């Protein structure tokens, strides 16, 4: 029987858009093309999300490596919350309904320590009964250890959980550990698939 609904943060509870952010703060298109790969790449993202170093130290390291982009890197550090464009439409109302129906809601997110600035701005996070953030536990999805952190901290039975994430590999990792899973697209699609699972259990 499903009792717990586990939710990713980015692209599930709140949306973000690097393109809008960089167009706003680095208006020169050619400079933006040179700068974006410095900051947004498959090598750096796991380091940031894992919290291997404090966020400000990571920025300082990047400035040391790319001093020509110090102004843009400082803007990114100072304006980080502006990456978020708002809550995912429909999700807050859906989570309120699910809580009223007796389900527990938990978060499981790959995010750097700056996530707390976002959580302070959007009250959808207040609906969660608990959460695990990758930079706190120094593990990232889809590593099985971060899912186990969630199970252990909140005494959850994976077979009583549904996990929603916008990335297929993260959902599949949760399934391998015993959770049901939904690859998230939008609130309507999520609720439809969730209700189907809940009715089957």
Image (cartoon, rainbow, N blue to C red):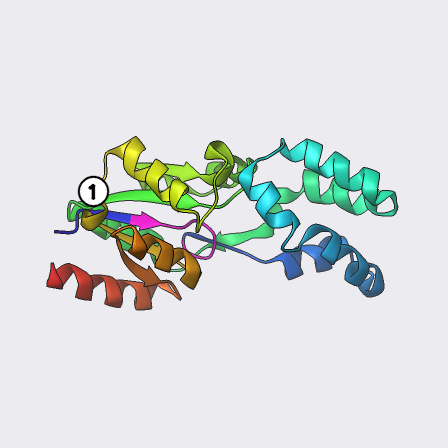
**Horizontal side, residue 71 vs residue 126: left or right:** right
How far across and down, in percent of the image, does residue 83 sit? 60, 50
Camera-nearest residue between 50 and 162? 50
Is 59 one of the magenta-colored residues? no
Magenta stretch in the rendered image: 6-12
Closer to the camera, 59 or 13?
59
Residue 196 placement: quadrant: bottom left
Q: Residue at x 66, y 55 (%)?
A: 41
Q: Quadrant of the C terminus?
A: bottom left
Task: Tell me the residue that label 1 is attached to.
Answer: 157
* The image quarter in which residue 173 lies: bottom left
Examine the rendered structure and indicate whether residue 11 appears above or below residue 129. Answer: below
Q: Is residue 81 visible?
A: no
Q: Residues within 10 Å of mark 1 (few under 14, many from 20)?
A: some
Location of residue 137 with respect to 31 vertically, above or below:
above
Residue shown at 43% from the left, 49% from the top? 9
Q: Residue 24: give x, y in percent of width and height.
A: 71, 56
């Amino acid at each position: 029987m499903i009792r717990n609904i586990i939710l990713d943060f980015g692209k599930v509870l709140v949306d973000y858009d690097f393109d809008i952010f960089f167009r706003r703060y680095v208006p020169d298109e050619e400079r933006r093309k040179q700068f974006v790969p410095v900051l947004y790449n498959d090598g750096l993202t796991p380091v940031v999300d894992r919290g291997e170093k404090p966020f400000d130290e990571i920025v300082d390291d990047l400035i040391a490596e790319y001093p020509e982009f110090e102004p843009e890197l400082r803007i990114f550090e100072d304006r980080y919350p502006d990456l978020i464009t708002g809550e995912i439409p429909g999700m807050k109302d859906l989570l309120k309904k699910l809580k009223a129906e007796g389900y527990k809601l938990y978060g499981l997110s790959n995010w750097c320590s700056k996530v707390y600035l976002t959580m302070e701005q959007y009250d959808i996070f207040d609906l969660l009964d608990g959460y695990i953030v990758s930079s706190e536990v120094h593990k990232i999805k889809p590593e099985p250890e971060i899912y186990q952190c969630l199970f252990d901290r909140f005494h959850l039975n994976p077979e009583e959980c549904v996990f929603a994430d916008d990335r297929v590999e993260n959902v599949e990792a949760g399934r391998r550990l015993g959770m049901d899973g939904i690859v998230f697209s939008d609130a309507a699609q999520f609720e439809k698939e969730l209700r189907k699972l809940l009715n089957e259990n």
